[in-house]
Amino acid sequence: MSDTAAIELVGVHKDFLSHGDTVQAVKPTDLAVGQGEFFSLLGPSGCGKTTTMRMIAGFEEPSGGTVFLDGNDVTGVAPHKRDVNMVFQSYALFPHLTAYQNVAFGLERKKVAKDEIRRRVGEMLEIVSLTGMEKRSPREMSGGQQQRVALARALVNGPRALLLDEPLGALDLKLRQQMQIELKRIQREVGITFVYVTHDQGEALTMSDRIAVMEGGRIDQLGTPREIYEKPATRFVAGFIGTSNLLDGSVDSVTGGVALLVFGPEEKVLVPVPASVTDGAKLEISVRPEKIDLSRDAPAAADCSVLTGTVREVVYHGTSTNYTVRTSAGADLVVFDQNAYSAEDLAGPGDRVYLTWSPQHSYPIGVRP
Amino acid sequence: MRHRLAPYLLVLPGGLWLLLFFVVPMVTMLSLSLQEGDVVNGYVLTGHWQTYVDAITNYRVQLVRSLIYGAITTVLLIVAAFPVAYFIAFYGRRRKATFLFLLLLPFFVSFVLRTISWRYILTDEGILLGPLKDAGLLADSFHILGTPVAVILGLVYNFLPFMVLPIYVALERIDPRVVEAARDLYASPLLAFRKVVFPLALPGVFAGVLMTFVPASSDYVNSAVLGSSSTTMIGQVIQSQYLVSSNYPTASALSFTLMAVLLIGVFAYARALGTEDVMKVAAR
Ligand SMILES: Nc1ncnc2c1ncn2[C@@H]1O[C@H](COP(=O)(O)OP(=O)(O)O)[C@@H](O)[C@H]1O
Ligand SMILES: [Mg+2]
């Protein structure tokens, strides 16, 4: 049981016909979500996240492929017969019912005994901190409270998986951060598989066990938050998740699995590469801004990447200071310097600086092993 | 001083409007109903309340009949209008406006003409009954014209848009995601309709009833065109008292009585079924 995926998509795709043209909202996709996993679908608006989720819930029939829930083929099964529940982007609470009736709706349809319903709804309202709000109608509740009702209404049924479509999208920043923590706590408490749709990369990174980054109806990369951040598989992922510095260059030599790219007399980039990369290969390298050291003095260590450049911009962010440096290698690199030790800026606009970072912090994008 | 008067000045346009179009005719009519006399010698206000007693006693049958026809019409209208409104709201897509226009299209023709055209449809050897009788499916003596069925059919036809539109508006306002949420929470399509769509449409039904029951009960055209002496409605009586008998006091007294009865009915209905409560009851 535990090794059957909670949700599995095999070759699932969805084509919409709009104004006579076929739009491939979701291209053929394989995907497996494990039991109890917090799985995120991350991508910009219009990349097919909602459509993917609606195919899992049964609101859209795939144009091709198979959907499995707990190993059972549910393709073509009506939504009310699927043991997954959805939290809608707009909450979609029943406006004519109270908070209590909203939460009890699913259990009533399942013909659970009255006493049992009362007990479970009460428990669930407690978990989402809404005790005492039973008689309120959705209209009389704040956005955050409505969002909790929507969550409770889905969770109370104890579904095999919970599908959440940008559930925090309508909340303000403070409340959103609070709800992120709370959602994570609730997920641990109830142990239900969560499929979480978001376009907010920070949210996905902090909450997920694994993330699928989508772009144009396709999954670009699937992995843990760390993998996705540290080793972006495509240029798109590198740019979409956090801030990324991208460098183009060709390999001068490869020694011991580390490629050397020379950009000038004292400028070079070292990057670990798989065996398939040989001399002359074109590489696209990603370096995260917080990995780079910025200094006005030439570096002592020889075995790290070094680039020189001119500071163009300095922005103070409180916890860190961000520098934009125009390098002689051509690209503008962003550097985050933690304000843990430095009482003043490391350099000012117009200063000549050295940028250094260790080889393992360079990552070649899209290179197949 | 000025700001004290301001609220009254602001009420002035609306107040004048009400005075001109509502209060003046009402007072005129009330006064008329309490006058005695005839067209030749003129009428004198005598406060003769007996007119009311006589009018109600003489035309009790027509008054009650009108209310019954009105009620039946309203119920049939709900049954007929709901599917139409539902179809346009949920399946109309980009043609919603077209469908609504088609619904209203016949109503660009005069009320009376439209009703007369139903005479041709319902007449004994007409396009509807003729073929059925020829095929032997109906007895030759069968007829619709002149019966309550024809009158109520005419009423339903003529007031259909006034029931469809408010229900359509209520359905149109339902977030499709809310219906999906019901489906997601284990409700079959039928249950999702019963527990969510229908309760949310009730305010529209409620408004539709208000908009159709009153004019249908006081209608005088349908019975005149499609009915017979056994279907006479109170509107016809009032009309003939005014225009044929020139018996203004009786006509006014009947109008007032009808208005009072309808107002009481509407208020009782609105109180008994406040919009909110309607939905709560239906959701059970
Ligand atoms: N019912 C539909 N008819 C036609 N096109 C649709 C429909 N639903 C979604 N699309 C299109 O499919 C693409 C993916 O949409 P969606 O899954 O909603 O993206 P996301 O949730 O990532 O913002 C978009 O280009 C959108 O316009
Ligand atoms: Mg979406």
Image (cartoon, coloured by chain):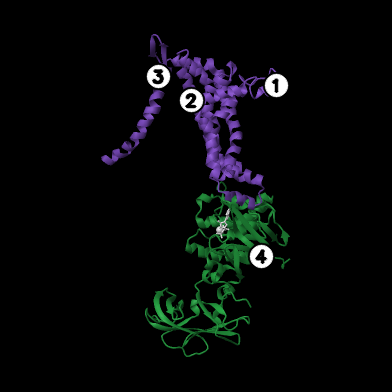
Chain colours: A green, B purple
Task: Tell me the residue at 53%/88% (across/down).
Answer: A303
User: What's the mark number on residue A30?
Assistant: 4
Find residue B34 and report its image quarter. top left
Whole-Å distance between the Cαs marked 3 and 4?
83 Å
User: Residue A25: where, in percent of width, then height?
Assistant: 59, 58
Whole-Å distance between the Cαs marked 4 and 2?
70 Å
In-front residue for pair A235/B87: A235
Question: Is residue B273 visible from the viewing direction of this image?
Answer: no
User: Residue B174: where, in percent of width, then height?
Assistant: 55, 46
Question: Disc 2: which chain?
Answer: B
Question: Which marked residue is nearer to the observer: mark 4 or mark 1?
Answer: 1
- Name the residue beneath numbered marker 2: B260
Whole-Å distance between the Cαs marked 2 and 1?
45 Å
Task: Tell me the residue at 71%/21% (across/down).
Answer: B134
With respect to residue B33, does A76 lie above or below? below
**Kind of residue at badge 2:** Ala
Question: Which marked residue is nearer to the observer: mark 3 or mark 1?
Answer: 1
Whether residues under marks 4 and 1 lie with C-beta atoms below 8 angstroms apart, the answer is no
**Kind of residue at badge 4:** Asp
